[in-house]
Amino acid sequence: MNKFILPLILLMSTVTIISCKKKEDVIVEAVEVKRPFADYSISPGDDPFTFKFTNKSSNYKSIEWRFGDDSLSVEVSPTHVYPKAGIFEINLKATSEDGSTARKLLVIKIIADSVANFGAVKTDVNNEVKFSATSKASIKSFLWNFGDGTTSTDPTPTKIYPAGKFIDATLTITTNKGSKIILIRKVSSKGSLIDVTDKYLLNTGPGFKAAQVIGRWGILSDWTVNDAVKQRGSGMGSWDSYNGGQWLSLESWGGETWITNGKISQTMTLPAGVYFFNAIYNDYEIRDNNGKTYIVMAEGDVLPDVNDVETKSLGFYRLRGNNPLDIVASMEITKTTKVSVGHSSTMESNNQTLKCRQVRLYKAF
């Protein structure tokens, strides 16, 4: 048995010696590493698109700035002019002698509407408005697009618009440094418009809310819906979830009960002024035979009956066929008035439908 014990003792001794040898070969040495530190501050320049970047980094050999608009600089403390409004991420990279890097990210927001503005006011000429603009930057040039295919480079152009309609006008301002400001405003023959929807209307979409739902159909929240519209499913109507949507809806389809003098409306009290009720549709299919469908603006807390809309409303638009899908009715009131807006419809034939995506209310100023 001693023949086996001796080699085992020798093997254990050898392992111990090797282990000790490895410990003696490990050398710990302190080495000072100077890593870079990236830091900077931003200060505004002499116009809303110009910024001064002051480098406060340390322990670096080189600097690289990326300004978030596909441009860069290796200057220590550069000044940069942005070409347009937007949100820009500034990325400063500091690199040390040994190749180590450090970064600092900040974001600049340049909002076009805070840099410039434009509007239109009515002139003494019928349906004519005059445009003007203001800007915090020095302006080199103007380009007006009036929304009907016509343009102008005049600083204060005039334009005649059709009565009772509004349109999106666009102004592109180029500053003396070449930056561009693009603004879009809704304008009518009465002048510029402001959106007062949230002040006077509830549940305006997109994504109309329902107070009750049974299957696909429901009853709109915050809108007055008469019984003539509640002919879908089990007494539902005015709200439709077709194809995953949440629509303000009127429908006479597939042999179910037709709509006779159906009304969907909201009532509010409005101060004197010119107003535009805008309905934007996902789709509609309206037939002239055996029925009429309108968007309506009317005095009082009830919409006129369908056959009285054209004589007893303050403003209306009759829907026909399947377009246009962006529709406006307008009205002018001379004193504070209780007004109802919405849809009046008779659909006394099959396969007619209306799915409204959104409604808005605008006021001329």
Image (cartoon, rainbow, N blue to C red):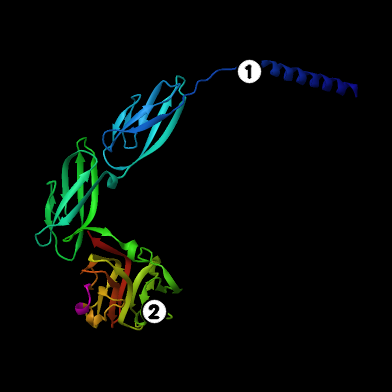
Q: Amino acid at mark 2?
A: Arg
Q: From what the image shows, is residue 322 above or below residue 77?
A: below
Judge whether residue 197 can be spotted in this image.
yes
Label 2 crowd (10 A; few <14 / some 14-19 / many >=20)? many
Quadrant location of the N terminus? top right
Identified at 19% across, 36% down, the residue is: 176
**Residue drawn at point x = 30 percent, y = 64 percent:** 360
The numbered disc on residue 345 is none
**Quarter of the rendering containing residue 169:** bottom left
Quarter location, residue 96: top left
Q: Secondary structure at mark 1?
A: loop
Q: Which residue is mark 1?
A: 28
Q: Position of residue 155 (x, y in %)?
A: 14, 46
Q: Is residue 312 magenta?
A: yes
**Marked residue nearer the N-terminal end (1 or 2):** 1
Question: Magenta part of the protein: which range?
Answer: 310-316
Q: Name the residue at 26% across, 33% down.
A: 46
- How far from the left and from the top, in percent, is residue 324? 23, 66
Residue 9: in magenta span: no
Q: Nearer the viewer, residue 337 or 48?
A: 337
Residue 43, image x, y percentages: 34, 32
The residue most toward the front is: 335
Where does label 2 land, which residue?
232
Q: Label 1 sits on what residue type?
A: Val
Outermost residue to the right: 1
- Where disc 2 sits, the SS reads loop
> Residue 39 location, x and y as percent?
43, 29
